[in-house]
Image (cartoon, rainbow, N blue to C red):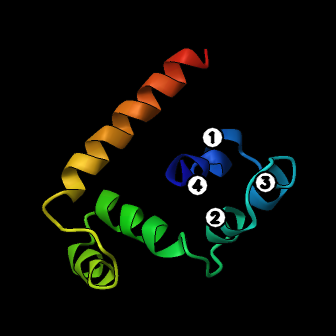
């Protein structure tokens, strides 16, 4: 979900802080989306590195997380599927 929210700025053409002030998000989620440190920040960085093909950065981030590089593609595909269903249902 954080990955989806990270795209709101591009999707709405509004500044992210302005968008987030109207959403009932946990403080840690909001902090990660704004580029500040929170428990979710490494996961958001991981997803962005994966999407952009920054493999060395991805492996460096993975060192600090309990996630295997073998399951990452499976998680990513599941997240894309979820996002697609959420987008279609939201229409």
Q: Give how far across and how far down residue 24 sits, in percent.
A: 80, 48
Q: Of the residues tagged 1 and 3, which is closer to the observer? A: 3
User: Residue 20: which numbered mark, if any?
Assistant: 3
The mark nearer the N terminus, 2 or 1, is: 1
Q: Are marks 4 and 2 in contact (CB under 8 Å)?
A: yes
- Secondary structure, mark 4, is loop
Name, please, the residue furthest toward the left.
Answer: 70
Q: Which circle marks residue 33 in the picture?
A: 2
Along the line of sight, the residue nearer the viewer: 2 or 49: 2
Q: Mark 1 points at which residue?
A: 11
Residues packed near mark 4 inside 10 Å, few (<14), some (14 to 19) or many (20 plus):
some
Query: How far apart are the two marked residues, 4 and 2, measured between alpha carbons?
Result: 6 Å
Residue 8 position within the rendered picture, expressed as x and y whole percent measured from the top left: 64, 46
Is residue 19 found left or right of 84 in the rendered image?
Answer: right
Of labels 2 and 3, earlier in sequence is 3
Q: How many marks?
A: 4
Q: Quick one: label 3, few (<14), some, or many (20+) residues within 10 Å? A: some
Q: Mark 4 points at which residue?
A: 6
Residue 51 or 24: which is nearer the viewer? 24
Graded by Cα atoms within 10 Å as few (under 14), some (14 to 19) or many (20 or more), the crowding at tag 2 reads many
Q: How crowded is mark 1: few (under 14 residues within 10 Å), some or many (20 or more)?
A: few
Tell which of 21 and 74 is nearer to you: 74
**Residue 13 is drawn in which quadrant?**
top right
Instruction: Give the CA distance from mark 2 to mark 1.
Output: 15 Å
């Amino acid at each position: 979900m954080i990955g989806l929210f990270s795209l709101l700025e591009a999707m709405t053409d509004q500044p992210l802080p302005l968008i987030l002030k109207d959403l009932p998000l946990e403080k840690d989620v909001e902090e990660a989306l704004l580029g500040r440190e929170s428990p979710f920040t490494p996961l958001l960085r991981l997803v962005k590195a994966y999407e952009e093909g920054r493999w060395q950065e991805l492996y460096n981030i993975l060192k600090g997380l309990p996630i295997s590089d073998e399951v990452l593609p499976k998680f990513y595909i599941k997240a894309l599927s979820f996002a697609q269903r959420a987008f279609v249902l939201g229409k």
